[in-house]
Image (spheres, rainbow, N blue to C red):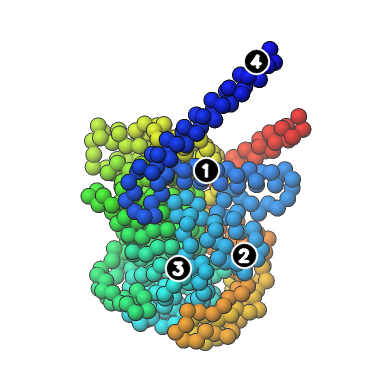
Amino acid sequence: MLRITWSCIVLVCCSFTLHALNLNATSSSSSSSKILVHPHQHPDPQAVVHDVNRRVNESVTRRQLLVVQVRDQCLTGNPIDDCWRCDPNWESNREHLADCAIGFGREALGGRGGNVYVVTDPSDPDPENPPPGTLRYGVVQAGPLWIIFSGNMVIKLRYELLISSFKTIDGRGANVHITGLGCLIIYDVTNIIIHNVHIHHCKPSGNAKIRISPTQVTERGRSDGDGISVLASSKIWIDHCFLSYCTDGLIDVTEGSTAVTLSNNMFTNHDKVMLLGHSDDFTADSGMQVTVAFNHFGDDLKERMPRCRFGYFHVVNNDYTQWGMYAVGGSSHPTINSQGNRYLAPQDNNNKEVTKRMDTDESEWRKWNWRSEGDLMVNGAFFVTSGADMSPQYAEASSMSPLSASYIDQLTATAGVLVEQRSDAGTVTNPSSGGGIVTNPAAPGSSGGGVVTNPAAPGSKGGTVTNPVSSGGDGSSCYPGQGSTGTITGTSGWYTDNGIDYGSIYNSEARTPLVPMTSVILSVIAIVAFLHRTCS
């Protein structure tokens, strides 16, 4: 009998092994036969979804085990933040941030491997010949560049800021606001990281000649007034930014862009939030792949969170605090995979539906693959699914379940900018130099800054930055200067222009979790389960 039992087990194992090999072969064959529209388009998008869910689950599990062991409580379960924020010496290895992206934009290098450039001058006097020390001068330099800021500043742009390939705009350690005309344009480039800056009150800019490289100037027409526009670009990662009060969209990704991740951002006070796909006749967007993860969609937002065309869109573990018309919408048969989000519907009974299909009949959109898995519907919210729920588009993604939406408070608690205002940003010498070595850094928890010495020569890409200043704060958090909800505190009145107080406007965005005890309860359950398995 025992021999027969073991024989059965062996046969079953062999059967499963052959089945798995057959599935892998089928998957590989399917992937290899798929015609890719863009060179940076992933041939197997569900594998990317699977990887995102795996990393989130691993990060949360690691945090729960540390709770059991009463060790470092810096971990949040957010795999991006847990990758770098718990390192007290993160400022001496800023480029490690490039290892932390997830999703379709996970290969974005930004300025990794290049020099460090320090923005010391917040002005924008000449878009055609920007002076060294300005942000515009840094973003048009040739080759990779990691751009940081000497202190708190408001950069009021006169025209669009066109960013060249292999650049990182890293606002950590400073309170940086970008506003004005045109705002950020990522056009026909690759490998861009934008991290930890406020982008708001962006208005259309007029015709102008704008430098896009050390040797090239281009003619630009009137812009739309988006916060960030991504056009015909790839390997883009926008993380921990605050976007609000712009003219058209807060973030638009269009014209054949792909390999994009939008994560840990906070969006407030706007109509059309996020457009992913240029138009219904721009079929090149069929290769678009975008991950939207860990974002907080806050107060007074109307629609497009996102609005998708063609392509594959993974919307995972985001927090939606009501909407005016709808949250997730689209046209031109996009694939939308919504996993582990919390959707809080508005009070208006006519707008409870999360989804909206545009410009098509139900007989057509019923074929589109729109899926909701593990989403939490609050206040009557409902998601209208369509297509084949377990089609090949979702098969591999389903093999690793998304983290429950009950963890949303934990995963999005620090969405938005992670810095708080410090009272003294330090002394900067020769500010038009374009950078230098930062010495005498402020200790975590202090309000001071450092002194910039040994400036780079005019025309250079910058100097070397070692252990740059950390922002103030009580020094008790994982990231010096971080507020408890990731918002700016104590900034009222620090900069006012045209009646806008760039400090106090963001203090109002501090939020209380909608379900403050959910994560605690789930953590306790996980701890009990872990102890039961360990002790039994």
Task: Estimate the spatial distance between the alpha carbons at disc 1 and disc 4, rounded to whole Å.
Answer: 40 Å
Q: Which mark is residue 4?
A: 4
Say what amino acid the circle numbered 4 marks.
Answer: Ile
Q: Are marks 4 and 2 in contact (CB under 8 Å)?
A: no
Cα distance between the residues tagged 4 and 3: 64 Å
Instruction: Tell me the SS state at disc 2.
Output: helix
Q: In front: mark 2 or mark 3? A: 3
Q: Which residue ends up furthest to the right in the rendered image?
A: 535
Q: Is residue 533 above or below residue 234?
A: above
Sequence-first tag of 1 and 2: 1
- The residue that mark 2 highlights is 90
From the top left corner, tell me how far across and down residue 135 is, in percent.
44, 75
Label 2 vs 3, first from the N-terminus:
2
Residue 521 placement: quadrant:
top right
* Quarter of the figure with residue 221: bottom left
Task: Specify few, some or many for label 3: CA neighbours under 10 Å numbering under 14, 14-19, or 20 or more.
Answer: many
* Viewer-side residue, 401 vs 106: 106
